């Protein structure tokens, strides 16, 4: 099983600032099969990024993903009030198992 | 548009059983693999199970293997999760989610709103 470790656990920033969230895998992720989700309280997760860097349908271009191998990053270029939420990375494409990171909480400073 | 609606959650005693359902609409259900993902209160996401588009392949997480069974009925566009021998640590919101591609498990492009399962005496 691939273990994903997200950092920081909590990130405190102000609207308009840039957010950088990290996801590190315990072993190389096949073909960059890495996704990012946003989850707000009481809501289901929403897909933001797949294939490490491809924005899902309807996702604003202030969200971008990068990285390869074991190190991946989600960047939000200019935070909007609605971006404050919990973010999860997920690896997929392995023979059977899917795993998620433990999440990064992005809070308003 | 794609819509997934879970039902069947509730309170059950340890050792009990529950069957979750996920009604799909807005897409050709039989063409897509489907998953269950859960989230314990205040915790992160945990993948539970996947079923292939044709139902031939079913894979369950080690934490539920032998106790939970995923299945599907393409005639009613419904995904199921039969949960037996429930434990308190199974307490969670259970989400169904669509996998956009046939083949190895992928990301989840659509999610339901979730149904809460509470295992408690």
Image (cartoon, coloured by chain):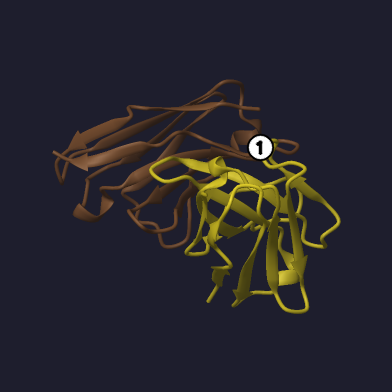
Chain colours: A brown, B yellow
Residue A80, image x and y in percent? Answer: 21, 52
Q: Nearer the viewer, residue A43 or B33?
A: A43
Q: Which residue is mark 1?
A: B63
Query: Split into 4 quadrants, where in the image is the C terminus of chain A?
Result: top left
Q: Which residue extends farthest top? A: A26
Which image quarter: residue B109?
bottom right
Residue B100, image x and y in percent? Answer: 64, 58
Residue A108, image x and y in percent? Answer: 17, 43
Q: Nearer the viewer, residue A47 or A104?
A: A104
- What residue is shown at x 34% (from left), y 44% (from top)? A86
Query: Split into 4 quadrants, where in the image is the N terminus of chain A?
Result: top right
Q: Nearer the viewer, residue B118 or B108?
A: B118
Query: Horizontally, is A108 left or right of B23 in the view?
Result: left
- What residue is shown at x 48% (from left), y 38% (from top)? A89
Query: Horizontally, is A95 left or right of B92 in the view?
Result: right
SS of the residue at dot 1? loop
- What residue is shown at x 86% (from left), y 56% (from top)? B56
Q: Is residue B70 above or below residue A97?
A: below
Q: Which residue extends farthest right? A: B56
Q: Which residue extends farthest front? A: B121
- What residue is shown at x 52% (from left), y 49% (from top)? B121
Subunit under mark 1: B
Residue A48, image x and y in percent? Answer: 44, 51
């Amino acid at each position: 099983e691939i273990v994903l470790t997200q950092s920081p656990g909590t990130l405190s920033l102000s609207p308009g600032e840039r957010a950088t969230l990290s996801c590190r895998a315990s072993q190389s992720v096949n073909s960059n099969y890495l996704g990012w989700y946003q989850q707000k309280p009481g809501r289901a997760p929403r897909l933001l990024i797949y294939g490490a860097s491809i924005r899902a349908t309807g996702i604003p271009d202030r969200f971008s993903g990068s990285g390869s191998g074991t190190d991946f990053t989600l960047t939000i270029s200019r935070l909007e009030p609605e971006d404050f939420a919990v973010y999860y990375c997920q690896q997929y494409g392995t023979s059977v198992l899917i795993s998620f990171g433990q999440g990064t909480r992005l809070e308003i400073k | 548009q794609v819509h997934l609606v879970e039902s069947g959650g509730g309170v059950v005693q340890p050792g009990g059983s529950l069957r979750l359902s996920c009604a799909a609409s807005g897409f050709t259900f039989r063409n897509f693999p489907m998953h269950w993902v859960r989230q314990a209160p205040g915790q992160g996401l945990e993948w539970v199970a996947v079923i292939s588009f044709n139902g031939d392949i079913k894979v369950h997480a080690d934490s539920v293997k032998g106790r939970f069974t995923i299945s599907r009925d393409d005639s009613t566009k419904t995904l199921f999760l039969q949960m037996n021998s429930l434990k308190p640590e199974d307490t969670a919101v259970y989400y169904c989610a669509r996998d956009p591609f046939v083949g190895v498990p992928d990301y989840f492009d659509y999610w339901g709103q979730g149904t809460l399962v509470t295992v408690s005496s």
